[in-house]
Amino acid sequence: MMGTPQLTKNQSLVMGALAHSDGPMSAYTILDKLRDHGFRAPLQVYRALDKLLEYGLVHRLESLNAFVACTCPQDHDHEHGVTAFTICEGCGQVTEFHDEAIEQRLSTLVRAQSFKTEKTTIEIRGHCKSCA
Ligand SMILES: [Zn+2]
Ligand SMILES: [Zn+2]
């Protein structure tokens, strides 16, 4: 993805809701936040999320069935590669990080199996410093 994609009104609203949220949000939470902006159906949220995921502006946390705004430096000229998250089960804090050593190791293992990766997300559940 080169540069900042042109977002539709609905995509910008969903992006804004996620960017201003303290933690991950489910599609239904997003829908509730955006009802005043004319959102009526989950499908409207899902459509916007699909595009934002495609642009790499948003990540999906599979274990929470929720979404977070990408917090890595917003020059999305690079491939996302392996995205890792720590997820606090106490306060819900989510931190995104990328590590080249993990990325290289995993891609070597995967390539050895002639497997074609679409995306890799590592979710580490536990407790943050303040909740431990
Ligand atoms: Zn990211
Ligand atoms: Zn915590």
Image (spheres, helix red, strand yellow):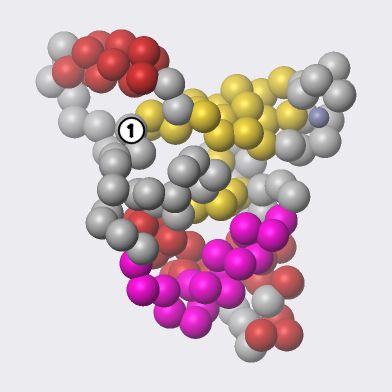
Secondary structure found at label 1: loop
Identify the amino acid type marked 1: Gly
Which quadrant: the N terminus? bottom left
Q: Is residue 12 magenta?
A: yes
In the image: residue 124, left or right of residue 10: right
**In the figure, is residue 28 to the left or right of 13?**
right
The answer to whether any part of residue 37 appears in the image is yes
As displayed, is residue 88 above or below residue 26?
Answer: above
**Residue 38 in picture, x, y percent from top left:** 64, 88
Name which residue lies at 29% across and 40% down: 79
From the top left corner, tell me how far across and down residue 45 is, in percent: 54, 70
Q: Nearer the viewer, residue 110 or 93?
A: 93
> Which residue shows up at 36% across the image and 19% down it?
100
Residue at the disc numbered 1: 81
Q: Quadrant of residue 110?
A: top left
Q: Is residue 59 visible?
A: no
Q: Main secondary structure of the magenta part?
A: helix
Classify residue 2 by image quadrant.
bottom left
Left or right: where does residue 3 sit relative to residue 9? Answer: left
| Residue 19 spot, x, y in % from top left | 62, 58
**Front one among 24 and 116:** 24
Instruction: Give the residues in magenta.
Output: 5-21
Q: Which residue is at a point 63% across and 59% down the rendered structure image?
A: 18
Relative to 9, is 127 above or below? above
Label 1 neighbour load within 10 Å: few <14, some 14-19, many 20+: some
Quadrant of image for the C terminus: top right
Is the residue 73 above or below the residue 1 in the image? Answer: above
